[in-house]
Amino acid sequence: MTFSLNDVKFPTGAMNMNIDHTDKIGEIVRTERKRLHVTQKELAMTSGTGLRFVKDIERGKPTSQTGKVLQVLNTLGLKIQIGH
């Protein structure tokens, strides 16, 4: 089974969260992945990362590569905004 964002309906409106630790990013990724009914393997394949990497993000690994984390977030339709 291949996961495609073309088949996914995203909610309208922004979700704002304060993220102060990598565990929170992992929680967001896991929650959104499950909401979309996507396996870790499907997310890894679709985002161009490995299964272990997705598992590490979901566990909150603090040394995960930022670029790859952004790839996974983008695949899930999530964006990061930085502000004061």
Image: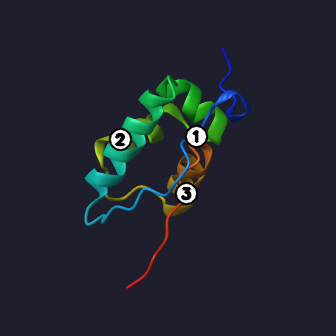
In the displayed structure, would residue 56 be above or below residue 84? above
Q: Amino acid at mark 1?
A: Phe
Q: Could you tell me residue 62's position as x and y percent?
A: 31, 58
Check disc 1 and report the residue beneath it.
10
Label 2 crowding class (10 Å Cα cut-off): few <14, some 14-19, many 20+?
A: many
* Residue farthest toward the right in the current orientation of the protein: 6
Q: Could you tell me residue 61's position as x and y percent?
A: 31, 51
- Quarter residue 34 falls in: top left
Foreground pick, 33 / 64: 33
* Residue farthest toward the top in the current orientation of the protein: 1
Check disc 3 and report the residue beneath it.
70
- Mark 1 to mark 2: distance in Å? 20 Å
Judge left or right: residue 71 versus residue 52: right
- Quarter residue 52 falls in: top left
Q: Residue at x 52, y 54 (%)?
A: 13
Label 3 crowding class (10 Å Cα cut-off): few <14, some 14-19, many 20+?
A: some
Q: Could you tell me residue 72's position as x and y percent?
A: 55, 47
Q: Amino acid at mark 3?
A: Leu
- On residue 58, the disc is 2
Q: Residue at x 56, y 61 (%)?
A: 67
In the displayed structure, would residue 56 be above or below residue 64? above
Tally of marks: 3
